[in-house]
Amino acid sequence: MLNRLLSHTAAVKRNKDILWHVFKFLSEHPPNASAAQEAFEELDWDTQTALWSLSTKAGGIWETWERDAIKYGRLDATNSYSVWERRSLDYQIE
């Protein structure tokens, strides 16, 4: 687990510029999943694996809906984005 966390952290540090673009595309309204996927695919396979290897709970940088958006290149591939969107709306209302 520690080795995966170290690899993950090193990959984030080495690729801040590309990851900035991925997060930027995902923060658009609505999120631009296909552009985020294209930016992520610019990374080499080992880096992608290191970034993908940890869940958010374990210290990873991707929420479930972000993982799905990057993996599938669209938001409607799974229901994780709509779940996230509902939770965000509920949080804003409270």
Image: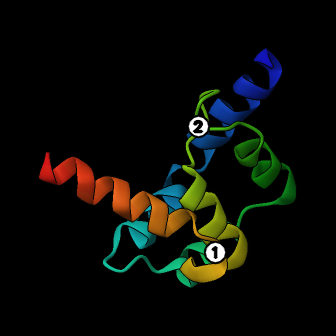
Q: Secondary structure at mark 1?
A: helix
> In the shown orientation, is residue 86 left or right of residue 69?
left
Q: Residue at x 55, y 60 (%)?
A: 66
Question: On the rendered image, what quadrant is the C terminus found in?
Answer: top left
Closer to the N terminus: mark 2 or mark 1? 1
Question: On the rendered image, what quadrant is the N terminus found in?
Answer: top right
Disc 2 crowd rating (10 Å Cα; few below 14, some 14-19, many 20+) is few
Q: Position of residue 31 (x, y in %)?
A: 42, 76
Q: Residue at x 67, y 38 (%)?
A: 55
Could you tell me how many numbered marks the image carries?
2
> In the shown orientation, is residue 44 left or right of residue 12?
right
Residue that protrudes farthest toward the right in the picture: 45
Residue that protrudes farthest toward the left in the picture: 93
> In the shown orientation, is residue 14 left or right of residue 49?
left
Residue 84 occupies which quadrant of the picture?
bottom left
Q: Position of residue 69 (x, y in %)?
A: 60, 70
Q: Residue at x 72, y 62 (%)?
A: 43
Residue type highlighted by circle 2: Thr
Residue type highlighted by circle 1: Gln
Q: Residue at x 64, y 27 (%)?
A: 58
> In the shown orientation, is residue 41 left or right of residue 3?
left
Specify the label residue 60 is tagged with: none
Q: Secondary structure at mark 2?
A: loop
Q: Position of residue 81 (x, y in %)?
A: 50, 67
Q: Nearer the viewer, residue 37 or 93?
A: 93
Q: CA distance from mark 2 to mark 1?
A: 19 Å
Q: Which residue is mark 1?
A: 37
Disc 1 crowd rating (10 Å Cα; few below 14, some 14-19, many 20+) is many
Specify the label residue 56 is tagged with: 2
Mark 2 touches mark 1? (CB < 8 Å): no
